[in-house]
Amino acid sequence: MKLPAQGKVSARFDAECAATREILSRVGDKWSVLTVVLLGLETHRFNELKRALGGISQRMLTATLRGLERDGMVKRTVFPTNPPQVAYSLTPLGRSLLKPVAVLATWAQGHRAQVMTSRKTYDAR
């Protein structure tokens, strides 16, 4: 995606930004990032994820997993047992998200003190 020249936004650029925003809102939300990181370590069943994430409701975890599955990042595997067991794992597309997430996490950890100082300065005004 090219940035607009001389401040002019074309319809194509606007459409590309909207599509990018939509994808980033999915992969950038709190629970999706944590879920991808956990599934990057190993395959998990629903209750394992719920325990590991701590604080997520069953409804929110269901919505997060469905969204990630819909976007092609998570694979849901149902095992024909009684009762049925379901496991979640990352697809190759989901695995490709691990490196950018790690880079952002490293940046956030490395700049946390600066951000906190800026927040205090801003809030004191």
Image (cartoon, grey):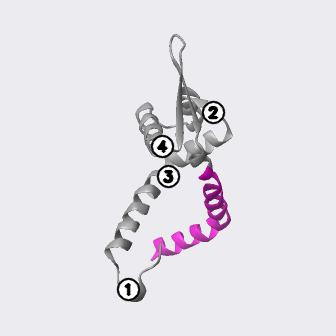
Q: Which mark is residue 7?
A: 1
Tell me the residue at 57%/44% (across/down): 36
What is the C-alpha distance between the residues marked 4 and 3? 8 Å
Residue at the spot of label 3: 27
Q: Main secondary structure of the magenta part?
A: helix
Q: Work out whether mark 4 precedes mark 3 in sequence or the reverse, and give the earlier one.
A: 3
**Mark 2 surroundings within 10 Å by alpha-carbon count, few (fewer than 14), some (14 through 19), many (20 or more):** some
Q: Is residue 121 highlighted in magenta?
A: yes
In the figure, 86 relative to 18: above or below?
A: above
* Residue range of the region highlighted in magenta in the rendering: 96-125
Q: Which mark is residue 43?
A: 2
Q: Work out whether mark 2 precedes mark 3 in sequence or the reverse, and give the earlier one.
A: 3
Name the element at disc 2: loop
**Mark 3 surroundings within 10 Å by alpha-carbon count, few (fewer than 14), some (14 through 19), many (20 or more):** many
Looking at numbered disc 1 in the image, what kind of residue is underneath it?
A: Gly
Q: For the C terminus, which image quadrant?
A: bottom left
